Each structure stands twice: as structure tokens, then as C-alpha cells.
Image (cartoon, rainbow, N blue to C red):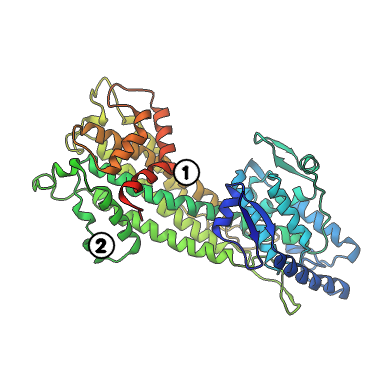
């Protein structure tokens, strides 16, 4: 079992994945406990001096100028959590909530939040006992970060609210804590605010999306190559010298992948020297690396933004080492909202160009002598006709989802929070776009495999053979129509999983 150690310098994207999707345990480094203790001593000094400081001795948001008496400050922190846990809708996935909790621990561990170590340790206990708060999907504007989602997480620490049960049902947090042998936390001054003020939800979703997009963009090169091979396309547009003269790094990587994937193919050999066969391929074939490569470059930018945020202090107010407690706007989710919207646009286009190749593969007028809809007996049978309908519908949905959320600010909190980021919404819809992209590429995988099967007895490339082997059990051989939904589900599982890529890389070496 792996262990993720929270240092006062932060954590890595791999740490987030290990906890969110894996079984890694979390521990606080001794240096982290020391940093938090030092920060807390500053807050205790402010309390003793009786100075008015936002979030310590005042109300919140539009109530920032309301002084709170010392004897009511613990009550203030508990009331804050209860009132802000106001989300509605279906629960967020377990992996998102676990990523969010780990990132909140990371934020507290940086030593600028002024909380006692026991607060961070309580969040660690939830993670290590696999207690996942029930966090509704609606509630965050990315204003002071992800207030409502984080409040639902914090409420579980108090032994209140809901958590996810073993089957995903909603159960009482108090029961879950008791069964795990954990005690509810009694918050002190500043601690409730420190638990909910920050970008941890949208950052967690963005980090998960980055990981998924890396895999999908490489698999987009694979499915493009299969479709091009099945349509007797040319490999010449992917020659490295043609991409060196337009030096976008992602484009060069995708072109190199596709060129390698098309080698050692009897299908490609059958027409390589036929000058009359295809003077110039359609854009969806020839420009595959330009689109997928631009998406790769977008992903690199988004990864840079997420990496910066992973090193950032996003709480408010923040406790500085010289003893000052200052209000900031670092919780505003604009950097993450912009990045998520940008990546959603790119991912939507990777799916859109894949659907165009599927349509071409199915069209007897354009697929270079393959049967209509890739059915050997078209007419009585419809082949993959409706699979393309499904892909077209998903492309349309992704285009709607690609409209940016981050331009849609709505003022809240009595105009105190008069510009919000909508970063939570941007990251949430990005995950939907990527899930849809998985399905789109699965349809192209299925169509490419079927097209290569129909080129028999010509032997496809090593990548083509690996794809046929991976999907052949579910897809079968070309023939009469079958119940297609299970075949498409199998294609999606092959596309999303690691085995097909691993099989291809055993033959060709690592793909970019």
C-alpha cells in the first residue's frame, strides 16, 4: 500500500491520483505539523489582543464588518459550515470528493491558514477510513473558491451532514464517524473558514481531467491511424519534415505517432505507389495531427496552470510569517476556469474530427471500396450506420458543453462577491466532455477495426492487428447485424483502458 506524505511544500498530481482513484494512505509530515502550529500561534495571538480581523473576529462575505464577541467565535465557525453546506443535486463522484479533501489538507499544510494540526488530521482520518462526504453537484460559483462543496466536506468532520454509503447511498456522517472510531471536531476561531475557502474542488477535477486527457489524446492518434489505414489513406502527410516547418510541438508528436502506427502494413503497401489512388486525402485524415496536436499543446498549458495552483496558497485571509493576517483574492477560480474551458474546447474538436472520419469510413462513396456502413450485406443489414448517429449526437452535445462557463459571472453575497469564476462548472463540464470523447473515440476504434477486417486478406499494421485482437472478441467478424450497444461498450472499455496502448507499444515502442 502506497503512502502520500503531506509536506509543507505541497504535493504532486500523482499524489492526488493515488488518493482519489487508488488506495494510498495519507500522513502529515512532522514539518507540516510544525508549520501549522506556528501559523496557529499567530491566530491565537490575534485572539488574545482582541484585534478585528476578517474571519477570525468578524463575520463573512457581506458581513465582514460585523464584529463577533470572543465567546461566540467557535459558534461562528460551526454556523459558517452549516449555512454554507447548501448544495443540491446528485452527489459528486467519490474520486472528485477525495481529491478535493486531499487538496484541502494540502492547503492547510502550507502553513498560511492558521488552523490547528488536528483539523488537517481529521480530514486525513476521513480519507484513510474511506469516509467520503456526500457533496451535491450544484452550489459552487468558484467565488471564494468552492464554498458549498467544501462545506459539505467540512460538515462531516463535525459529525453532521451526509456521507456516501457502501453502495453510493446517502448515510449519516455521525454514524460513519462512530463506526470508524472517530470523534467529531470542535472548531476554533478561523478554522471553519479555512476549511471551505479555496479552489480545491475545481483543481481536483482539473487534475483528474488532465490525466484522462493525456491518455485520450494519444488514443486519438491510434484511432485516427486505424481509420486512415482502413480507408487506404496516405502516410505521406505525416512525414516529420512536413511538421518541422510548422513547429508546434503537439502537432509534431501526433504526426510522428500516426506515421509510426501506419508502418509495416500490407494494407498500406497495397496502394503506396499508386499515384492515381489518392492525390490528397480529406482534411479529417490529413489534418489529424494539426487538430490533435493543438489539443496536446492546450493540455500542456492547462497542466502548467494546474501545477502553479498546486503550489499556491488559496485561503483567505492568509497568515503571513511576520504575524500579519491579510485578506486576498487568491481563492478566485479564474485561472482554473479559463484553463478548463480551453481544454473542453480542444477535447470537443478532437472528438469532432474523429466523428468525421467515422462518417467517411461508413460512406460507400468515400471509403475507397469498402461496403456501405461496413456491412458485407448492406440493405438487409445496417452495419455501423446508427453508431455514427450516436457519435454525431455526442459531437453536438460536446459543442454545447464547449461554450465557456468562465464568462458567465453572477454577483452574490449582497454584491460583496460581485464577480465569480464559475470554475467549478467549467471543470465539471470538462469531465463530461472527456467522458463523451471516450465514447467518440470508441466508435472510431470500432469502425477502424471493422474496416481493417474487411480489407482481409491484406494484413494490417501491428497497431491494427493489436486493435483487431483487442476488440475482435466483442465485435466478431464482419457479418449479419448484432445487438450493437454491448459491442460499443466493449470498444469504450478497450479505448479507455491501458491494455491496447500497451500492446501497441510493445510492438512500436512508447507513443508520444
Residue 195 coordinates in the image, percent (x, y): 72, 58
Q: Split into 4 quadrants, where in the image is the C terminus?
A: bottom left
Query: Closest to the observer: 175 or 144?
Result: 175
Residue under pointer 2: 243
Query: Closest to the observer: 409 or 336?
Result: 336
Q: Is residue 241 visible?
A: yes
Count of picture labels? 2
Q: Residue 413, which numbered label?
A: none
Residue 313 coordinates in the image, percent (x, y): 64, 67
Q: Residue at x 49, y 60 (%)?
A: 339
Q: Is residue 148 left or right of residue 453?
A: right
**Disc 1 packing (10 Å; few <14; some 14–19; many ≥20):** some
Separation of marks 1 and 2 at Cα, in angstroms: 30 Å
Q: Residue at x 56, y 52 (%)?
A: 17
Kind of element beneath mark 2? helix
Q: Residue at x 74, y 63 (%)?
A: 62
Q: Is residue 17 left or right of residue 436?
A: right
Q: Is residue 258 left or right of residue 86?
A: left
**Disc 2 packing (10 Å; few <14; some 14–19; many ≥20):** many
Q: Is residue 85 visible?
A: no
Residue 373 coordinates in the image, percent (x, y): 26, 31
Query: Closest to the observer: 94 or 265?
Result: 265
Q: Is residue 195 left or right of residue 424?
A: right
Farthest residue in the top direction?
A: 380
* 326 up-or-down from 307: above or below: below
**Chain-order first, disc 1 or disc 2:** 2
Residue under pointer 1: 435
* 253 up-or-down from 282: above or below: below
Q: Residue at x 36, y 36 (%)?
A: 470
User: Which mark's residue is nearer the viewer, 1 or 2?
Assistant: 2
Amino acid at each position: 500500500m502506497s503512502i502520500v506524505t503531506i509536506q509543507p511544500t505541497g504535493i504532486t498530481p500523482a499524489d492526488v491520483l493515488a488518493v482519489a482513484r487508488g488506495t494510498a494512505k495519507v500522513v502529515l509530515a512532522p514539518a507540516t505539523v510544525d508549520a501549522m502550529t506556528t501559523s496557529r500561534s499567530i491566530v491565537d495571538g490575534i485572539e488574545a489582543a482582541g484585534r478585528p480581523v476578517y474571519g477570525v473576529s468578524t463575520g463573512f462575505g457581506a458581513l465582514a464588518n460585523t464584529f463577533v464577541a470572543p465567546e461566540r467565535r467557535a459558534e461562528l465557525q460551526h454556523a459558517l459550515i452549516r449555512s454554507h453546506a447548501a448544495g443540491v443535486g446528485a452527489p459528486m463522484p467519490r474520486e472528485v470528493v477525495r481529491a478535493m479533501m486531499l487538496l484541502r489538507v494540502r492547503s492547510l499544510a502550507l502553513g498560511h491558514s492558521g488552523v490547528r494540526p488536528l483539523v488537517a488530521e481529521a480530514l486525513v482520518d476521513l480519507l484513510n477510513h474511506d469516509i467520503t462526504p456526500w457533496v451535491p453537484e450544484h452550489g459552487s460559483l468558484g467565488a471564494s473558491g468552492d464554498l458549498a462543496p467544501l462545506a459539505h466536506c467540512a460538515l462531516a468532520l463535525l459529525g453532521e451532514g451526509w456521507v456516501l454509503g457502501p453502495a453510493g447511498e446517502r448515510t449519516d456522517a455521525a454514524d460513519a464517524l462512530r463506526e470508524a472510531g472517530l470523534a467529531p471536531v470542535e472548531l476554533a476561531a478561523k478554522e471553519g473558514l479555512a476549511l471551505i475557502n479555496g479552489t480545491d474542488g475545481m483543481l481536483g477535477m482539473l487534475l483528474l481531467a488532465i490525466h484522462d486527457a493525456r491518455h485520450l489524446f494519444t488514443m486519438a492518434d491510434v484511432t485516427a491511424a486505424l481509420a486512415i489505414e482502413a480507408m487506404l489513406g496516405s502516410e505521406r502527410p505525416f512525414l516529420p519534415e512536413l511538421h518541422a516547418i510548422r513547429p508546434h510541438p503537439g502537432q509534431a508528436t501526433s504526426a510522428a505517432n500516426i506515421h509510426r502506427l501506419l508502418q509495416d502494413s500490407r494494407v498500406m503497401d497495397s496502394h503506396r505507389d499508386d499515384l492515381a489512388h489518392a492525390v490528397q486525402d480529406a482534411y479529417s485524415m490529413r489534418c489529424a495531427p494539426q487538430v490533435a496536436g493543438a489539443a496536446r499543446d492546450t493540455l500542456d498549458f492547462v497542466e502548467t496552470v494546474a501545477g502553479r495552483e498546486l503550489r499556491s496558497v488559496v485561503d483567505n485571509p492568509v497568515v503571513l510569517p511576520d504575524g500579519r493576517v491579510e485578506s486576498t483574492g487568491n481563492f478566485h477560480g479564474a485561472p482554473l476556469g479559463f484553463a478548463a474551458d480551453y481544454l473542453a474546447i480542444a477535447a470537443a474538436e478532437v472528438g469532432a474530427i474523429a466523428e468525421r472520419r467515422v462518417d467517411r469510413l461508413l460512406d460507400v462513396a468515400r471509403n475507397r471500396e469498402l461496403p456501405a456502413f461496413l456491412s458485407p450485406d448492406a440493405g438487409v443489414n445496417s452495419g455501423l450506420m446508427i453508431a455514427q448517429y450516436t457519435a454525431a449526437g455526442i459531437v453536438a452535445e460536446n459543442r454545447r458543453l464547449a461554450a465557456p462557463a468562465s464568462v458567465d459571472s453572477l454577483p452574490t453575497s449582497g454584491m460583496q462577491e460581485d464577480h465569480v469564476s464559475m470554475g467549478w462548472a467549467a471543470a465539471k463540464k470538462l469531465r463530461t466532455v472527456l467522458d463523451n470523447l471516450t465514447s467518440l473515440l470508441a466508435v472510431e476504434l470500432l469502425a477502424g477495426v471493422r474496416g481493417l477486417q474487411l480489407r482481409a486478406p491484406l494484413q494490417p499494421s501491428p497497431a491494427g492487428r493489436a486493435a483487431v485482437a483487442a476488440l475482435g472478441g466483442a465485435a466478431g467478424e464482419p457479418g449479419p447485424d448484432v445487438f450493437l450497444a454491448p459491442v460499443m461498450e466493449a470498444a469504450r472499455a478497450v479505448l479507455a483502458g491501458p491494455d491496447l496502448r500497451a500492446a501497441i507499444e510493445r510492438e512500436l515502442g512508447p507513443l508520444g
